[in-house]
Amino acid sequence: MIIAAMVGSALTPVGAMAQGVEAAEAPETAGDIIVTAQRREQRLTDVPISISAISQETMQNQQIKTTLDLPKLVPGVEVSHNGVWVTPTIRGVGSRVGENSVAQYIDGVYIPNPVSALSEFAAVERVEVLKGPQGTLFGRNATGGAITIITPDPKIGEVEAQGSAFLEERNGWGGTGYVSLPIGDKFALSISGNYRESDGWIKMGVNNIVGGSQPVPAGTPLNAVKHSGQRVKLRFNPDADFDAILTFWHGKLNDSGATVYPAISNQLLGGDVDLPPYRAFVGFVPTNDVEFTQYSLKWTKHFGDTSLQSTTAYRKDDNFINVDVSQSTIAPVQATWASTQKTFSQEFVLNSKIGPLDAVAGLFIYDDRFVKEYIGAFHHQDTFSVAPFIDLTYNITDNLRVIGGLRYTYEKRSFTYDAFDGSVFFKSDKSYNNISPRAVVQYDLDDRSNVYASFSQGYKSGLFNTDATGLVSPDDLAAQPLNAEKLTAYEIGYKRGSRFLNLSLAGFFYKWENIQTNRYVNGNTVAQNAAEGEIYGGEFQLTVNPTNYLSIFVNGAVMHGRFTKFPDGNASVQGTAGDLYDLNNPVDPLVVNVSQDWKGLRLLNAPDLSINGGFNLDIPVGNGTLTLTPNVKYSSRFASNGILLDTSGKNLLERGSEVLVDMSVGYKIGQFKVSAYARNLLDNNFYSEPNYNALGYYGLWNEPRTIGARIEFKY
């Protein structure tokens, strides 16, 4: 089987596509893939929204294990992993404050916690990446877009089974399993599971510093991981008009990954630090434990050309972290917190077709209770939101259609700060309202191509800062609620799909207001709104299938994303415990932070150029097929976590241009496939997450070359 590992992103907020093609078996084109980006099943070609649809086999071939790997196939997408937070960014739009600006859904259930967004892509049917603000159809904090993960439903009357196992360097091993069994002629049950562990790639360094110590033996793994998950689905399908699926999902992530801070420059260590690559100093091995449990019930009832779908879900996330932020062996600085998040959501979606009109209407209800135990206090944030929405498609002719949509959102946030000893207590609350519109004109040039123009808006609710410490009243700077983010997007695009050639082009312009970000004042985290940003650019995706055995893809994004107004950015400081220092003058301490004007600086996770490409080649050999699947990703320089300017105006946290090459070679015979693979084949080494705190600046090393082997079966 040939699968074009394409997934570009080609059109946007309301008109684009990226495609996955099964060239050897598909009688049509990538555009015949069915997606649900407009809350109903449609051909990918027919959807005027920028989509990257990644199949299960493509994810295996291209080493797509978690959200962190999506940039390998989707240009314009970057994913930051700093500390415990996983922050997807689409076309420069993303935020590490509160919930992500790119919403994530699994089987239609919204996932609010940016920590558990790291969970594995196991037993997944496909992943859809929607670009641009999804204010109407996926409106929950989707200013940047949405990532929707679809897992297989059990089949009535059919038996299905598949599994995989792998071994790789640094004691990496694991696997996945999935089985679906019929229970009579109306019920079916599926069970899936996944497990992965590895020693990681950061180890404790050898301490040669005078006066230092070796509290952790040199060579001890510092970012080891263990991921596991189980999902059970029970399906009830009594007739063609009713279908219900009850799901239980549980997962554990023991992943200290990005909580290790290899120092680049550190005041405790006397300034610049000369550590070998993939080594760090810590006073103890860090811990980051995540556990989540989710229950959901989805049912659909058909009434002729009308259907009603209900999705009810309850989710509980627990997170415990214990890290040494000193980046040294001289004076460990322990940071510990524990958080619990309980979320209930209910959504109704009504689909109806009335002559030339296709209508989608719905209601989303959301209740979230978050509590964090951090530095002597409990931080509570309670959220209640209700959002009705409607999206109408009117077919003026067989070739011309217009789309209009609206979502109204009401949200109330309550923040409570309660000290352990009861000495400090206060409560604040704030309400937010928004109307997000969508308008599209789409014209079909023929059955396989169309052009479109779109306007859309996205909205991310305001919130309170649950990372602040030492608060004494609601008047404190760090206790002030943030304003809501708002993004307005314009786009024009073209897409064409045929058996031989798939091409999609798009040009876009964004205006981003009230950007939510963090600022550090006297060692405290202060959430703030960063005024305005502007993003414009273009994207392309090209997939060529010259034969049934070869598919070649190239995807690219050219983008200009800059702050257009931000007079009070983060301070350019370093320091020892309790004192702050000018980065270029570590002798004289500063009393307070120094604000900087960030106007004209590049937005975070917004490289000016990103390209990925590769091919999928199937060669008949003996009784089986040899498959070769390389992938190359390039991105120009950008900053993933923050801005730290030196006196010349250079951002010390910017990453340089990067090239990553992955490769997979497999042999498939019957129901089995064995593969050898390499991630970062050229062993390109760089700091993937440069950042800073009051002690200095540091950078998490990217994953070095990793070679492994995998076996798969499918029944």
Image: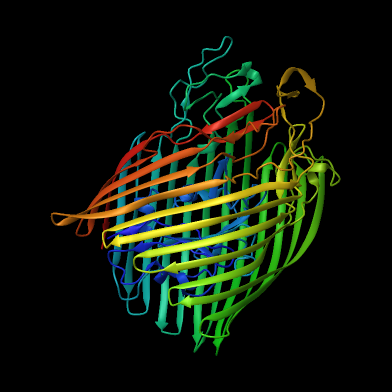
Nearer to me, 588 or 48: 48
Q: Residue at x 44, y 49 (%)?
A: 612
236 with respect to 584 (left or right) = left
> Which residue is situated farthest in the top direction here?
210
Residue 191: x %, y % from top left: 37, 61
Residue 110: x %, y % from top left: 57, 61
> Which residue is situated farthest in the front direction here?
445
Nearer to me, 32 or 279: 32
Q: Residue at x 64, y 48 (%)?
A: 561
> Which residue is situated farthest in the left direction here?
622
- Res. 298 in view: yes
Residue 70: x %, y % from top left: 47, 51
When the figure is inspected, residue 209 is found, relative to residue 392, above or below; the finding is: above
Q: How is the image coloured?
A: rainbow
Q: Residue at x 56, y 62 (%)?
A: 12
Quadrant showing the C terminus:
bottom left
Residue 466: x %, y % from top left: 71, 46
184 with respect to 248 (left or right) = left
Nearer to me, 274 or 318: 274
Quadrant showing the N terminus:
bottom left
- Res. 65 in view: no
When the figure is inspected, residue 330 is found, relative to residue 523, above or below; the finding is: above
When the figure is inspected, residue 394 is found, relative to residue 204, above or below; the finding is: below
In the figure, residue 455 lies in which quadrant?
bottom right
